[in-house]
Image (cartoon, rainbow, N blue to C red):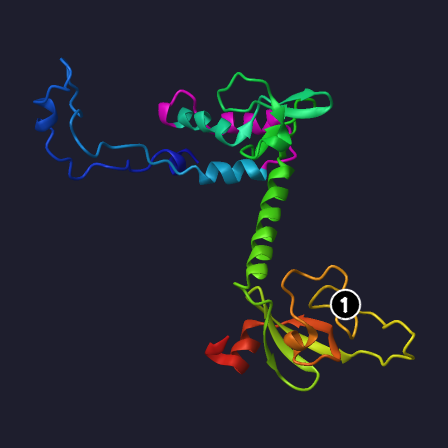
Amino acid sequence: MDKVIVERPRRGGGVQGDGRAFRNSRERGSHLGMKRGYDHPKGLNENLAPLKRWLHKQVHRPWDKVYAELNSGIDRRSTVQAHIFQHIDDFVERRAELRDGEVCVPPHRWGTHRSVPLREAPNVELFVHPVTGILLPNRRLAEAKAARRADRKTWAAQRGDVPYAVYHVIDETTQWHCVDSCWFEIKLAQFPERAGATQPEERRYDVLRRCLVTRSGAAQRPAPGMPTHCGLYGRNDVYAAAKRQLSRREVRARLGDAA
């Protein structure tokens, strides 16, 4: 891990420009370093993704054991390898504390202000539980990301930027629908006829809409921007009774490049 994270070529360098303009100006200091006045000094080029992935794989383990494994595989006497420990706090919050039965973390990386609840710290991905010492993920962060993705889809559907589905008619009872870039084979079924004018319409579960629907189109909590029966299936008397995800080979065999 130390070779992947630290031992990489540094960024920058190449054409440095002419530093004489700065050295001859009034802004220069009395003692100048060799790099002063150049445009593109070299910088660190660290790949921290392996360290982040490894730490995420250690969740639900005691932090003492995780930290011991890091120490056993990295030589602190080496300046290059010891540099890895400076980035642990970038991914793991080790200063969490329990306050009024709730886990709280410092508001800033180096801050000394009052701690805030974990749910109000979206930048914290992993933390060490102050009581058990177990490395845990910030579930609030995952829930917030999922909610943002759902909101983006909802807003796009409400604006009409993305159609709910693109479909091809195979036969009278079979259609292929493309939902979220995935193709499904939909089996249609007809709504039952009303027993009488005073009788309520029977509800059926639509597997494509994932809600109960009736012949008139009423549904329980339909997705925003969802079209009517006719707009979705081309008919008003049917609903999706079953669906099956299609493989790429099936889609290409029938639709070709249009898919």
Left or right relative to 187: residue 177: left
Compared with 258, 161 (above or below) is: above
Residue at image mark 1: 218
- Where residue 194 sits: x, y (%)? 87, 79
Q: Which residues are magenta?
A: 58-80
Question: Residue at horizontal 75%, vertical 80%?
Answer: 237
Q: Residue pushed farthest top?
A: 30
Q: Residues within 10 Å of mark 1 (few under 14, many from 20)?
A: few
* Of residues 123 and 213, the one drawn nearer to the viewer in this rendering: 213
Asked which quadrant contains residue 4, the reply is: top left
Compared with 67, 195 (above or below) is: below
Q: Quadrant of the N terminus?
A: top left
Q: Is residue 132 visible?
A: no
Q: Is residue 36 visible?
A: yes
Compared with 221, 182 (above or below) is: below
Check if residue 75 falls in the magenta segment.
yes
Asked which quadrant contains residue 98, the reply is: top right
Check if residue 89 falls in the magenta segment.
no
- Where residue 224 sits: x, y (%)? 65, 60
- Where residue 103 sits: x, y (%)? 67, 26
Q: Amino acid at mark 1?
A: Ala
* Of residues 220 and 132, the one drawn nearer to the viewer in this rendering: 220
Question: Residue at horizontal 34%, vertical 34%?
Answer: 7
Asked which quadrant contains residue 93, the reply is: top right
- Where residue 135 sits: x, y (%)? 62, 31
Compared with 102, 169 (above or below) is: below
Label 1: which secondary element: loop
Left or right relative to 79: residue 147: right
Question: Residue at horizontal 61%, vertical 31%?
Answer: 120
* Of residues 26 and 14, the one drawn nearer to the viewer in this rendering: 26
Left or right relative to 178: residue 132: right
Q: Residue pushed farthest front?
A: 198
